[in-house]
Each structure stands twice: as structure tokens, then as C-alpha cells.
Amino acid sequence: MNTRLWRSGPDVAVPEPADVTVICHRRLRGPYTGAGSLMRALVPSVYERWPDLVAEHAIEILSVAPELKEHIGAAPETLTSLAAPEEQTRIYAPVRTRRLAHGLVEFLDAYVALSGLGALRLAFADVDEADHTDQEFLAILLRRAHGSPITVTVGTRGAEPIDELASALTRYARPADLLAGGFAAGTVREQEQLLRAYIDSDGTSDNPHELDAYRAADPAVRVLLHDERSAELLRDGDWSLCLGAVPYHLEHGSDPAEVGGDAFFKAVFYCARMGFWHAILDYVPRARAMVGPERAEAYWHFTGKMSTALAVLGRSPEAERFYLEVRGRYTLPLAQTFTGYALAMLYTRLHPPELRDHHVAKAYVNNSVTIASMLPDPEQRTFQSVFQRNGLALVEMHLGNLAESFSLVDEGLQQLDRELPADRHRLHRSALIHNRARVLAALGRLPEALADFTAVIEIDPNYPDYYVDRAALLQKLDDMSAALADYDKAITLGPPFWEIHFNRADLRSRLGDTDGAIADLARVVELEPDQLDARVNLIGLLLETGEADAVDPLLQEGLRLAPGDARLILVRGQLAWESGRTDLARRDFDQALEVDPELVPALASRATLAVESGDFDSALSDLTRAVETDPDNSDLLYNRGYVYQAAERWAAAVADYTQALALPDADVGELLRQRSLCHRELGDPAAEHADLDAARTASGQAVPAGAA
């Protein structure tokens, strides 16, 4: 065994002992074993001194260390968090764990600033054995803590971490000495002591003597010790042990099929509810092997959760194979209903575009609608019928049948209100109202859509996505101040959410708040550096505001992340041009257009360079391609007209100026003045003076007759 260490932070050269050391092995507590242990070590004392800081980050803290609820109270509730397991119909996207990680990093930053510690030294062990959530957290921590007073030590047993963490270690940390494997002899221990040490490590020990003792032990003794350890953890341990050590011991205990299966069931459904999808891919193969297909209910539920995890993680073809396994193995109505719906979602939304087929999706969900209508339990029949028809509504929307989509959702809401008590399936009722609002917006019935968005916010006021959707609608209704207020509110309702900042930046830019737009785009880039649209927009605004000094680091980092991005190459060329390096500029414009031949700003920039060198033909070729790509751009038409004019092709210039004048954003006065000059060269004084008179009217200024 070889242990590898990496260190980052201000004391990397002469490391100090860690303030907090945590073991990250997923067999201990499953997802966020390390981050949760860190929070359990820090939060109680932080809460005593700065309760507002803890409250601000309660969602992410309790998501990684749920037992801290006893110390800090509950986070703001949503219908999603309040829904009973049988009423849970919403799933989180995989990016939610990134948001949690960012929130934890910002909690640590704020804690260090408030405490006056000067530095916070953190050590994480067994990281290569950690769940994806911990490795993702550490990758984000290493990047965002770089240059801060937070020192991070990462230890692995020699296996490779996930790609993002491996990249972060390479970029932001230094490898320490390779610590040779092997364990000192020390005190000689009996085989029983070695065996118990391995069991008490919850199967995480890498001491070869302990592992050998475990393997050599009587299987019956091993089973007994696993049972004893699981009982001890359930009696005295934190709840999060039920995501790691407890199911591990029960898996190897005296009743893996029943008791072990139940423990895995609890862990799988919790992780599905929280969006910890990678953990499910660890649990379910083990659970399926324990319970076997003979326990039909457990087996198909496990398989369904694993398939959902595969689908949302971008592995939808694998998910389809498992859904079809369930359909081929069982005739259980709910198994058929669930998998039919799930397959419909694959074919209408989750499959890659080349595999999507909305008609196949409709066939699957129609089958589920039919089965749901025949379920014997009245409440289940009502709920499943409405739920399946909501899926059908999505398919109909994708097929362009908006009126039918609206009817399905609207009738479903009415059926729930008519047939079920008001306190049942509140989460799904809210989802239906939200979906109806989206369909109404697509139908152009904007005031009705606004009413539904407002209604769902009143029902579930702490769910940020609803505010984001309403803000987008309010922009269409030209109520910019209300839209801005919704974005502001959404940002306060949970961990960092880069999409909200991106959307708010666009709105702020439209409102003329360039500084605010820059701040929001900078926030996006801080959270997710690979969001290239935000990076390009930020660079553009900085150049517009004369903050060119801030552009270079943004540009260089962008090119490191995406060296072939045409927009970034274009910016590099524009900066070279401004500094007088026209050869470098031309090279970059050429390279950008090799990547994206229809990149209009690159075509326009290269055309301007050509004009400066007197190469009108090349300039016209580029501008013609640009106009063909963006025919309603009056600036492009003006520029091409100007080049035609410089090349003494007067009639062509007149045609471009005339076409530009018909566009709503045209600079009417300037276009008329230039066209008047062309009319003069064409020998048409009447047209020349008519354009000059019109230019005078447009600009409100006197234009002397015959002026150039």
C-alpha cells in the first residue's frame, strides 16, 4: 500500500499540523463522509458565536451532516423537503452537489474571516475511497481556496481520484513525499484483536494484518461481529452512518437479504431524494445481489433508482437496458407503470438527441396511463393517473401539441382537487401548477402564466427555481423591476446557483447596469470557470468599459480550459490588433474562423483589417458571409456598404444602405448621408438632395446641401 499526499495553501513548504483531520472513506458515512465530518467538527462552536453565518448556509450544512439539525435547527423548508417518501416526485439534477460544495467553501471562507484565525489547516484522508460528492467538494475547495488562508492536505491510498480532483491537485497543490507502504510491527496483537480492529474500522482498514485476520476468520464469527457492530452503530451513532457503515455491516451480517436489503433501501431512497446519484451506483449492485430478483418489490425499486441515476448522469442507454429488464421480468402493475414513464422520459428528454423519439415516448407513457387507470386503490389510481398524464403532457409539448399538453395538466389538477384531500400530494400539485404555467407561457397566454407562477410561489415560497422562471416571464412582459426582484430573491434561497447570476447579468445589462452585470458574470466565472458564455460576455463588458487590464487573466484561463474556443481566440486577436500587432491579430481571426466559419464578429474584424490594407475584395467576401449569417444586422450592412463605397461600387453601396434603413436599429441619419454621397457619384442630384433633407430631419440638424 502506498499513501500519496498533496498539500496546498500558504504553509505548503513547511506544513503545520492540521486543525481538523477527517477520513473520507465512503464506507463510513457514504456521500459527504469527509465534508460532513468537517462540518460536525466545526459547526457547533461556530453556531455558538455566529449563528447567522450557520443559518445562511444551513441547507448545505444539513445536506452533508443531517444530524446537526439537533444543534442548529432545520433549514428553510420546501415542499420537496417536506414531502413524504411516497409523495416524492421531484428529483434534483446532478449539479446540485456542486452548489452544496460551493456553499460549504464559502462557509469556510467566512468562518476564517470572522474568527481571525489567520489560517485554517484541513486534512482529508482516504480521498480516493471517497464518494463522488467528497471528491467534487475537494476539487472545488482546492480551486477556490487557492491563495486564501485555507491549507488543504489530501491523502490517498494510491488509486486515482476523479478527473476533476486529479486536475485540481495538479494545478493547485504540490505532491508531498511518497510515503512507502507497510506497517511497523509495533505491539504484537492476537488474531482476535486484529479481526476486531478490522470490524471496528467498518471495513476501511488498509492494515494488511487486520485484513488477513478478517479473511482468515471463521465466517460465522465474522457474521456475529458484523451484527454486533451494526447494532452498536444504530444504538449510539449518528444517522449518517446509515449511509455507510451500517449497510456495510448488515450486508455481511446474518440476514443480508431482509435486514441488509432494508438498510440499503433506506440509503438508496435517501440519496435519490438528495440527488446523490453516484452513491446509488455504488449501493444498488450490492443491494440487487443481496435481495435477488425473487424479492420483486425491492429488486425492481432498486433497479429503478439505479436506472434513474444512470439517466441523470448522462448514461441513458444503460438506464434503458435496466428499465427493460424490469419490464421483462415482472408483471407488477406499478413496476410496469414506473418503467413505462421512465422510458418515455428517456425518449423525450434524457437520451442524447440522436436517440430521442417523441413518438416512442408517447407509446410508452400511453401504456402507463392505461395501467394507472386500472389500479385497485382509489387514491393510488388517481395519483398515478394524473402523474402519468403529466408525463404525457411533456411529450405532447415536445411534439408541438401545446393545447393538448395544457388540457392534460389542467385536467390533472382538477382531478387531484376533486378526488384527493387537499393535504395529499402537495408537491405534485405544485409541480402541475408550475408545468401549467410553462405551457401557458409557450402558448403566449402570458398573464395566465404569470398568475400560475405566482400561485406556485405562494404555495412553495422557498423554492428558487420558481422565481427564476417567473423572472424570465416578467422580462417578456417588460416588467424589468419585478424580474430583477425575483432574481434577487432566488439568490437568497439556497446555495450558490450560477444560472441565476447569469440570467440576472443579462437583465442588468439590458437595464444599463453594466457594473452589476459585470459583478454577476464575475460570480459565474468564480463558481464555474468553464461556463464560457459567461466568460466571453464578461470579457466583452470589461472591454466596453475600458477595463482591459482585467481581461488578460480571464482570457488566458479561458484559453487554458477551452483552447479551441473561437470566441476567445477572437478576443485574443482583437487585443493584439489594439496593441498594433496586426499579424498576430490576423492569425487569430483566421484561426477563429477555422473553428467557427460563421462567427460574425471575427468576419467583421478580419474585414476591417483587409480594408486597412486596401484589400477590398477580401473584406467584401467576409462581410458578405457575415450578412448572410446575420441578415438583419444594420451595422453589417452599413459596413459592407461603406466598403463598396470605398471600392467605388456605388450602386452596390446604395443597395446595402437602403436595406439597412429598413431595419429597426438603423442609424438613419448616417446611412442617409452616406447614400447621398453615392447618389452624387451616380449622377443623381435629386436623390442626393432628398437623402440629405431626410438626414437633416432624422438628426434634427441642418445639413448643408452638397455636404460630403
Image: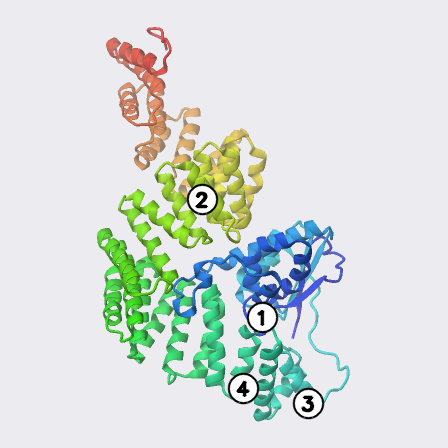
Callout 4: SS: loop
As drawn, the label of residue 152 is: none
Q: Quadrant of the N terminus?
A: bottom right
Nearest to the eye among marks 2 and 1: give it.
2
Callout 1: SS: helix
| Residue contact between numbered discs 2 and 1, judged by CB atoms under 8 Å | no
- The residues tagged by marks 2 and 1 sit, at their Cα atoms, a distance apart of 41 Å
Q: Quadrant of the C terminus?
A: top left
| Residue contact between numbered discs 4 and 1, judged by CB atoms under 8 Å | no
As drawn, the label of residue 191 is: 3
Q: Earlier in the sequence, mark 4 or mark 2?
A: 4
Q: Earlier in the sequence, mark 2 or mark 3?
A: 3
Residue at the image position 30 percent from the left and 25 percent from the top: 660
The quadrant holding residue 661 is: top left
Q: Earlier in the sequence, mark 4 or mark 1?
A: 1
Nearest to the eye among marks 4 and 2: give it.
2
Callout 3: SS: helix
Question: Dot 3: within a 10 Å radius of its alpha carbon, few (fewer than 14), some, or many (20 or more) residues?
Answer: some
Task: Give the image location of residue 393, x and y in percent.
Answer: 27, 58
Q: Which residue is mark 2?
A: 486
Nearest to the eye among marks 3 and 4: give it.
4
Nearest to the eye among marks 2 and 3: give it.
2
Q: Amino acid at mark 1?
A: Glu
Q: Which residue is mark 1?
A: 129
Q: Amino acid at mark 2?
A: Asp
Q: Amino acid at mark 3?
A: Gln
